[in-house]
Image (cartoon, rainbow, N blue to C red):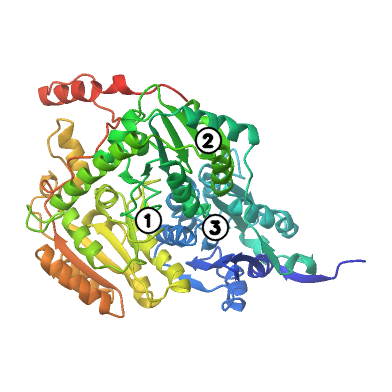
Amino acid sequence: MTDKTITLTTAQAIIRYLSNQYIEIDGMERRICGGGFGIFGHGNVTCLGEALYDARDALPLYRGQNEQSMGFAAAGYAKQWLRQRFMFCTASAGPGTANLLTSAALAHANRLPMLMLCGDSYLTRLPDPVLQQLEHFGNPTLGVNDAFKAVTRFWDRITHPAQILQSLPAALATMLDPADCGPAFIGLPQDVQGWTYDYPESFFAKRTHRIRRQAPDALEINDAAALLKTAKRPMIIAGGGVQYSGAVADLTAFAVAHNIPVVETIAGRANLIQTHPLNIGPVGVTGSDSANTIAEQADVILAVGTRLQDFTTGSWTAFAKDAQIIGLNVGRHDAMKHLSLPVVGDAKLALAALTAALKSHRAPATWTDFAQTERTKWVAYTNDITTPSNGPNSYAKAIRAVNDLCHPRDRVVAAAGGLPAEVTAHWQTKDIGTVDVEFGFSCMGYEIAGGWGARIAQFEREPDRDTIVFTGDGSYLLMNSDIYSSVLTNRKLIICLLDNGGFAVINKLQNNTGNESFNNLIADCPTVPAPFTVDFAAHAAAMGAQTETASNPAEFAAAFKRAQAADKTCVIVMQVDAYDGWTTQGHTWWEVGTPHTTQNPKVAAKHREVESSRAKQRKGV
């Protein structure tokens, strides 16, 4: 029987297809694509814009203020939905699309689904060179959009309307693949967007998708179980992949059944609640003394759902050189890092298989007791440094104020600078999956935009809860326009803006390597003759937010309570010390490039100090 056809433009067909793709989550069918973020221009307004207008109820389009922040918002949305749903971003040909490069890289680094539908030059080349077109004299097919090949998991340029019959399902399959998940880019030449084709109607039939659960290999499970049974000091590293697998309860049950202490990565924060007895704290460069102490002594490390970034591994100095690592990951590339014994498969299925193989085996009680004692010491340290009366205003004190007052289901968002370290170290998790510290790409500007995207997703399931954003003045100045977006769309944020007068955490790194403060703090910029303080509260108020300025942690806490009661986006500003109040404990070694020769004796001394720890570094692949 011949399939009936329907004549549509390329743009219309793309939007109709996306509108009919569903996924089942918690017993409820939802569209996989939650809508999109868009800024229209000559590369996407006439054709794609026409198609989106007709689908505006099924695929709501949020008007962006900046293409890069649109991509960050899409990433925040995907994280909140645990990669089960995504948003598209559409931008015009030229600089609009180019602005998405950074956010595509963020999504790629964090393994997040995001679809980019971007304008491109005319396929016919009849009007060339067109506005904003980059001309490569020896290769007329090369343009801005080709730059996305390095930062996407799927890339295509549609040169004929029929191609989307193959391209769209392939892009969707990539974004839903637990191992290869990442951003997808589809370039849409301006003429091709409007060309028509007789598409088979079956292509647009409603389809409900599932995210694949890959079962682990039985032999790999047996090898991992055998190794764990030999361990005198085993440890679990819980990464972000645990949450994406929906395996948080399974990992907790596994740890309890076998009495194995658990440490968390930055992406894996909020895998365990703070009070769980096997939660030994965050590990690595922005970690805790407790987690790093047991990491140094562990003989077998079960790394679950983590890509083992350098902040987790302390540039591979956090673990004993002879410690054996089991890499349990759905991605083969991550499972095999540093000569790990790989278990390639879904975390939920693999943990169940490991439990069956281990049977009643439990780690020595003396080891777990030791880990818990170390955790008690670390909690005492964090309680001390976050106490309002101890020292100057600091990130840590602001975090404590919010942590004490927030609802367990509120979501916390932070990224880049010093706040990821301070949130990772001091945030006491009240409920599972409530922390988003973007440190995969460590991207300034993600905070407010990513918070807006997270709030859009949160509003779809938990509208009464808050999304809380921690940002510094540097990131705020880089990208703040989604305060306006949140006000326009009635998606309330509580933004905690902590002003330390510049890029203070990089100034700290500068000083810690023997260098003088230079060009990081506003006061130390040689091209700034008369520094002044930005009135951040007035600036945010001009975009429609409710704002307050606090002079100390008590005022900050009171302002936060008022923000909780408010019905629109609130910005709370507090100045914090650029030099004092930082967390000084809990840090592993981190490899940074330092000058091997210098006329500055302080820099030379710090170089020798940095290099003195290199002997601990594991060598591997």
Q: Which residue is mark 3?
A: 116
Q: Position of residue 317 (x, y in %)?
A: 33, 28
Q: Is residue 416 left or right of residue 185?
A: left
User: What SS does tag 3 mark?
Assistant: strand
Label whose residue precedes the other's in the sequence (3 or 2): 3
Residue 599, quarter of the rendered image: top left
Q: CA distance from mark 3 to mark 2?
A: 29 Å
Label whose residue precedes the other's in the sequence (1 or 2): 2
Q: Which residue is mark 2?
A: 335
User: What SS does tag 2 mark?
Assistant: helix
Q: Position of residue 180 (x, y in %)?
A: 58, 45
Tell me the amino acid under the disc marked 1. Answer: Asp
Of residues 602 and 118, the one nearer the viewer is 602
Q: Nearer the viewer, mark 3 or mark 1?
A: 1
Q: CA distance from mark 1 to mark 2?
A: 23 Å
Label whose residue precedes the other's in the sequence (3 or 1): 3
The correct choice, above or below, for 238 with respect to 76 in the image is above
Q: CA distance from mark 3 to mark 1?
A: 22 Å
Q: Is residue 154 left or right of residue 584?
A: right
Q: Residue at x 54, y 44 (%)?
A: 351
The correct choice, above or below, for 153 with respect to 41 in the image is above
Q: Nearer the viewer, mark 1 or mark 2?
A: 2
The correct choice, above or below, for 231 with respect to 306 in the image is above
Q: Residue at x 24, y 54 (%)?
A: 474
Q: Is residue 390 left or right of residue 15?
A: left
User: What SS does tag 1 mark?
Assistant: strand
Residue 112 badge: none
Q: Are marks 3 and 1 in contact (CB under 8 Å)?
A: no
Q: Residue furthest right?
A: 1
